[in-house]
Image: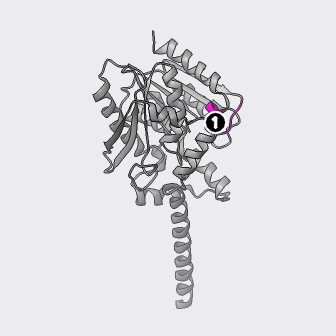
């Protein structure tokens, strides 16, 4: 009897240790996802001619330091090349930083908008210890919106453009925090973080049977939220302002059908465009002229009326 009890205890202990090790591994992969180096991003964008140092240096701008409600500071720039109060806030994707957003700033300048580019929590120069894929980032975005509105006034047109995680953050903000921008552009957002997490674990960690409940438990305990709460597909149903959904069909990281699902769930004014070329978050890079024209038509139809 004692021997059986001892064997059961050992098996239980080993199982607990194995589950804990797996839970830590999965949650670490999510919370502390490896970021690209800031210098790498800068040189990549310069080499690709998407970041013009001369333009950026000459552009009238204001450094932004905004207090996050989550207890750290957010760093960014308010770029003001135009004599207008109309503004677009640009939200970059995971592992990137505000330099990656400069390419969109040039596009929106040609469309008549000044822009705000900033680093998400734990990226670039902003504070924050973990990445939460939109959960805490949506409250950071709220702080940025309030700071910008205080400058431009309520009469100005304010848009939010997000890419990848930034797009999910945009939709979560508009659908669960405050729908107080005039329009939103969602570029390659995921519709459900649980669905995306399954793909990440299978493709990158080579775990075919996804222990989702283990990952969710450890993230909830360690970072204070459930990954099941990150659901842009539910948030988008409550957005009343116009939304433009963009995605590239070859995207293998976040499937284009997720944007189709988001578009179908959105009520009211909306538009969808799927590009023939471009991997994940490469729609603008591979289709820049077409991308700008799609945005221009969206603004003409739903915003500048």
Please tell me which residue is depicted at 52% across the width and 28% down the height of the picture: 106
Q: In this orientation, does residue 233 appear?
A: no
Viewport quadrant of the N terminus: bottom right
User: How many other residues sit within 10 Å of disc 1, few (<14), some (14-19) or many (≥20)?
Assistant: some
Residue 98 in the image: state x and y as whole percent: 48, 41
**With respect to residue 255, does 24 lie above or below?**
below
175 or 102, nearer to the observer: 102
Question: Among all residues in the image, which is located at the extreme top?
Answer: 305
Q: Secondary structure at mark 1?
A: loop
Which one is nearer the viewer's eye here, 13 or 196?
196
Looking at this view, name the residue that lies furthest to the bottom: 2
276 vs 269, left or right, is right
| Magenta part of the chain | 277-285
State the residue in front, 113 or 25.
113
In the rendered image, the vertical position of residue 12 relative to residue 224, given as above or below: below
The number of discs equals 1
Q: Is residue 29 shown to the viewer in this render?
A: yes
Please state, as top left, top right, bottom left or bottom right, where the C terminus lies in the image.
Answer: top left
Q: From what the image shows, is residue 16 above or below residue 244?
A: below
Q: Which percent across, then down, holds residue 128?
A: 39, 53
Q: Say which residue label 1 marks.
A: 282
């Amino acid at each position: 009897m004692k021997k059986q009890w001892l064997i059961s205890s050992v098996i239980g202990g080993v199982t607990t240790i194995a589950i804990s090790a797996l839970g830590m591994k999965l949650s670490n992969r999510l919370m502390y996802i490896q970021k690209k180096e800031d210098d790498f991003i800068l040189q990549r964008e310069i080499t690709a001619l998407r970041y013009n140092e001369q333009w950026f240096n000459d552009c009238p701008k204001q450094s932004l330091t905004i207090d996050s409600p989550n207890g750290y500071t957010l760093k960014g720039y308010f770029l003001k090349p135009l004599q207008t109060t109309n503004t677009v806030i640009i939200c970059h994707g995971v592992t990137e930083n505000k330099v990656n957003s400069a390419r969109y700033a040039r596009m929106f300048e040609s469309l008549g908008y000044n822009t705000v580019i900033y680093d998400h929590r734990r990226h670039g120069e902003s504070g924050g210890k973990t990445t939460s894929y939109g959960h805490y980032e949506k409250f950071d975005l709220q702080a940025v919106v309030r700071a910008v509105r205080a400058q431009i006034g309520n009469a100005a047109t304010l848009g939010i453009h997000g890419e990848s995680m930034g797009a999910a953050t945009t939709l979560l903000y508009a659908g669960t925090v405050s729908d107080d921008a005039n329009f939103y552009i969602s570029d390659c957002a995921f519709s459900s973080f649980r669905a995306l997490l399954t793909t990440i674990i299978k493709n990158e960690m080579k775990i075919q049977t996804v222990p989702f409940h283990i990952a969710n438990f450890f993230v909830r305990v360690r970072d204070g939220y459930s990954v099941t709460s990150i659901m842009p597909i539910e948030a988008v149903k409550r957005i009343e302002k116009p939304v433009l959904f963009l995605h590239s069909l070859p995207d293998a990281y976040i499937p284009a059908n997720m944007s189709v699902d988001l578009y179908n769930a959105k009520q009211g004014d909306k538009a969808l465009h799927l590009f023939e070329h471009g991997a994940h978050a490469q729609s603008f890079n591979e289709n820049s002229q077409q991308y700008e024209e799609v945005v221009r038509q969206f603004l003409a139809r739903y915003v500048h009326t």
